[in-house]
Image: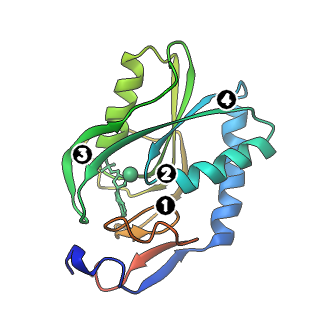
Amino acid sequence: MSSANAGNAHVSVLIDEAQLHSRINTLATEIHTAMPHGPLVVALLRGSFVFAADLLRAMHRAGGKPQVDFMTISSYGAGMQSSGAPIVHRDLTEDVQGRSVLLIDDILESGRTLTYARNELLARGARDIRIAVLLEKPGKRAVEIDADFVGFTIPDKFVVGYGLDWGNYYRELPFIGVVEGDNE
Ligand code: IMP
Ligand code: MG
């Protein structure tokens, strides 16, 4: 299926709203225990914006006082294949020098995006960087990197929804779904 079909495909539910909500509350408690002193949350746009919004509110319920900033890095074009080298499209506003940073992304696949982001923050003097991802696809890593907090480990299928897109469609879906017909 080409990306011209994006937006009109059938999407089946892989992880529903209740599962997302419950897992994110647990993750927030784990994060608050590991990083009790209000980390600077750096959310990678665009894919992590829904996860970031829910995780931040769950961190509040867990007793945390995080600060937030955003960075746009992409290694995908309009399609389903990563193009390789990440590019920064929009940069942070905050200075990360000496900060404890929680770097969050929607999904860890090849690991290139998060490796690039982590190295960038280290080069800017971040003191401590932990990584939280909503989803992880095992066996797809091109570079060696692990997330400290993982919501769900999923099969090697292209997923959309809850911030994740296909050709910038489907980010609004309140669940994580699989595009039918594309993953066989
Ligand atoms: P990585 O750099 O290969 O680890 O890819 C991470 C980025 O690729 C994520 O932030 C997503 O934007 C995108 N990505 C990877 N897998 C999927 C998928 O199944 N659906 C939608 N986007 C994906
Ligand atoms: Mg992304």
Q: Position of residue 29 (x, y in %)?
A: 73, 43
Give whichever of 154, 2 is nearer the camera: 2
| Label 4 or label 1, whichever comes before in sequence order | 4
* Residue type of the residue flagged with mark 2: Ser
| Label 1 or label 3, whichever comes before in sequence order | 3
What residue is at 43 percent from the left and 51 percent from the top?
46
Q: CA distance from mark 2 to mark 1?
A: 6 Å
Q: Are marks 2 and 4 in contact (CB under 8 Å)?
A: no
Binning the other alpha carbons within 10 Å of mark 2 as few (below 14), some (14 to 19) or many (20 upward) gives: many
Q: Can you identify the residue that label 1 sits on?
A: 163
Q: Position of residue 81 (x, y in %)?
A: 22, 61
Q: Secondary structure at mark 1?
A: loop
Q: Secondary structure at mark 3?
A: loop
* Residue type of the residue flagged with mark 1: Gly
* Residue type of the residue flagged with mark 3: Ala
Of circles 3 and 2, which is in front?
A: 2
| Label 2 or label 4, whichever comes before in sequence order | 4
What residue is at 26 percent from the left and 65 percent from the top?
80
Q: Position of residue 16 (x, y in %)?
A: 60, 74
| Label 2 or label 1, whichever comes before in sequence order | 2
Q: Is residue 153 left or right of residue 116?
A: right
| Label 4 or label 3, whichever comes before in sequence order | 4
Say if disc 2 is inside 8 Å of ligand 2: yes
Q: CA distance from mark 2 to mark 4?
A: 20 Å
Q: Can you identify the residue that label 2 sits on?
A: 48
Q: Which mark is residue 142?
A: 3
Q: CA distance from mark 4 to mark 1?
A: 25 Å
Quadrant of the drawing holding the C terminus: bottom left
Say if disc 3 is inside 8 Å of ligand 1: yes
Q: Secondary structure at mark 2?
A: loop
Of circles 2 and 4, which is in front?
A: 2
